[in-house]
Amino acid sequence: MRFSDVIKTAFYNLWRKKFRTFLTVLAIVIGAVLIALMTSIGTGLQRFIVDQFGLMVPQDALTVYATNRSFTHVDTPYEIVDSSDTIVRSFTTDDIDKLLSIDGVERVDYNVGVSALYVKAAGSDKKYSISINSGPDYQIKIVTLVAGDFFVEDSSGKCLISYDYLGAFGWETAEDAIGKEIKITVGKASALDTETKDYTFTVSGVILKSMNATQIVIPMNDTIEMARYHRDNPDQYSPEQPGTSLLVKVSDINDIDIVADSIREEGFSTITPNEILKEINNVFSIIQIGLSAFGVIALVVASIGIINTLMMSIYERTREIGVMKAVGATKGTIRLLFTMEGVALGLIGGVAGVAIGYLAGKALNIVGSYTFLSDYPTFEMSVFSIDMVLLVIAVTTFISLIAAIYPANRAAKLEAVDALRYE
Amino acid sequence: MIKLENINKEYRMGEEIVHAVSSVSLEIKEGEFVALVGPSGSGKSTMMHIIGGLDTPTSGRVIVDGQDLSSASDKELSRYRNEKIGFVFQAFNLHPTYTATENVALPLIFSGIGQSNRMKMAAEALDIVGLAERASHRPNQLSGGERQRVSIARALVTQPKILLADEPTGNLDSKNGKHVMALLSQLNKEKGITLIIVTHDMEIAKEAGRIIKMRDGKIVEDEG
């Protein structure tokens, strides 16, 4: 029997019992829609998080720690061989020279940071929480501004504020915020010292809304000054005390893994943005599997429907099977015919399910963009990829194929003589 | 052409073993018209199924056209049924949603013949049984006699050497029965097809050149 005739016959037989086929396919469709939609939402979330990650960490730089310890590996307990491993070591001037001498390193900067107590708009008494972000130009410029401009690297007294501060400070639009003043209050690291100091900044830009809703970006010079005050340490972030971590920028983003390896060979530790991304992606793979599990359960239920449909079909068509055998169909042919019917059910269900899932995802994106996602114009809740579409169709088809095996074997094993006598 | 050597066929029915056919030996020559007659349960249908490759004997040898069926695989038997045998059933066993042509073309699907050739060959077979103008009718649009002629066309379409008809007139009135019998014996005479008819109707059997009477799984009379 020609394969094209097998396919034609399978679809013809399904078409003969339209309503029953429709119901069986419907169950598969539900499973396929669930898998497709859930996976697409997983992909959407993943992209969002990865994009946000890209807005927080420059992709061509490494944060390097002086301590020789694989503390970045949290997937397995790290055996401490040398007790000095447990001491968080600070960098030295020599270390910076060592880093600068590594091939592919463009520049090395202090990984500056300071914790402030609160922030106020000038002339207002309302205090708001704040997380200060700072760094060299290339690190600052990964954020997107909705209004104003970046400040230049060596400036001071300028700042970029998160979009969410507009509402907090009572500024109508992002443009209104430009040129306004804010006061950041810094305390002392020692809990016993209650002295505080205010630093005034002029808003030069407003950052596109992101998950980092309380960040205020200030120049490095100001951060260093504030950190020295905070810690009562005038030598903080100086060649003598570079800190426990440094920012290393690579000259070519493609060499980042090689540079990271060289840095590790020098006895420092680091983790590349790609490695972090891999971790994030791993987490999302698990989330996607979890989400699509609902769909898989639905498909398993649907496969019982397939078995039922095919079994009923075999009972109804017993004589027909007998005739087919009498006129020359082998067991293999009968098996193939019924298996193909199951496969066809899965294929139709998969294609229809993905199509409906795709439309539902689009609808979700449209509804989302007007409602709960209106602040994140670039974020799509549901993202379909061709790989995922093919995978879902393959999964429904495969499950249907498995479901068809038992009925198809039953049909193949029918004795022609008995089948012809069947009433 | 057909040679049965010491054929036995046993069934298990609950605790009991039924001897459907016991120690039957028989030879049928090419082009013969044989009627297998006997009361129900005499083993005549089982004999026909064994000759047709639908059933295998418990012991004994079946050799048809030089091919030993007793040791044939499912594939070999299927091919044998497809190429050498044409079955005509009492209940016609037509596919209810297929047209007459599609019904007739069914065996050709399993021969691996393409769609357009199938339709051509089916049309020719329908022409032989005189139903060319009913080609696109479905079984429920045909009379009983016409249905049986479609089923004869289906049996003929692969140009088999042997036609096996199990009570071919059993579901027909006498007029249509006569037509069908006339058609079958015409095929036997004109095309030289070996024709074996299973019947309990002696009127029908009389048309055959040879009548084999069976009872309790044994041949009790073989005249012709």
Image (tube, grey):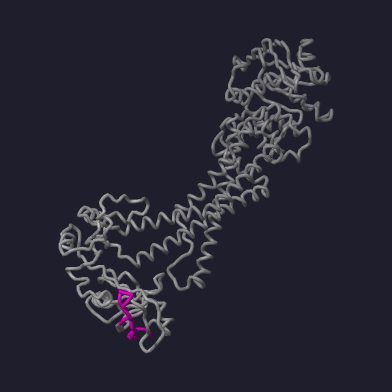
Say whether residue B55 is left or right of residue A362. right
| Picture quadrant where residue B217 is located | top right
Residue found 51% across the figure and 73% down from its top: A370
**Residue A26 higher or lower than A5, as above or below:** below
**Residue A73 higher or lower than B138, as above or below:** below
Q: Which quarter of the rendered picture does the N terminus of chain A lie within?
A: top right
| Picture quadrant where residue B21 is located | top right
**Residue B168 higher or lower than A251, as above or below:** above
Residue found 65% across the figure and 32% down from its top: A324
Residue found 57% across the figure and 40% down from its top: A340
Q: Nearer the viewer, residue A110 or A409?
A: A110
Say whether residue A70 is left or right of residue B78. left
Spot occupied by residue A215 in the image (x, y as percentages of width and height): 36, 74
Spot occupied by residue A242 in the image (x, y as percentages of width and height): 21, 67
Specify the farthest residue to the front: A192
Q: Nearer the viewer, residue B213 or B20?
A: B20
| Picture quadrant where residue B195 is located | top right
Q: Which quarter of the rendered picture does the C terminus of chain A lie within?
A: top right
Specify the farthest residue to the bottom: A123
Say whether residue A96 is left or right of residue A168. left
- Which residues, given as a range, are shown in magenta? A175-196
**Visible in this render: residue A262?**
yes
**Visible in this render: residue A152?**
no
Membership of A195 in magenta stretch: yes
Spot occupied by residue B190 in the image (x, y as percentages of width and height): 69, 21
Say whether residue A26 is left or right of residue A228. right
Spot occupied by residue A238 in the image (x, y as percentages of width and height): 19, 71
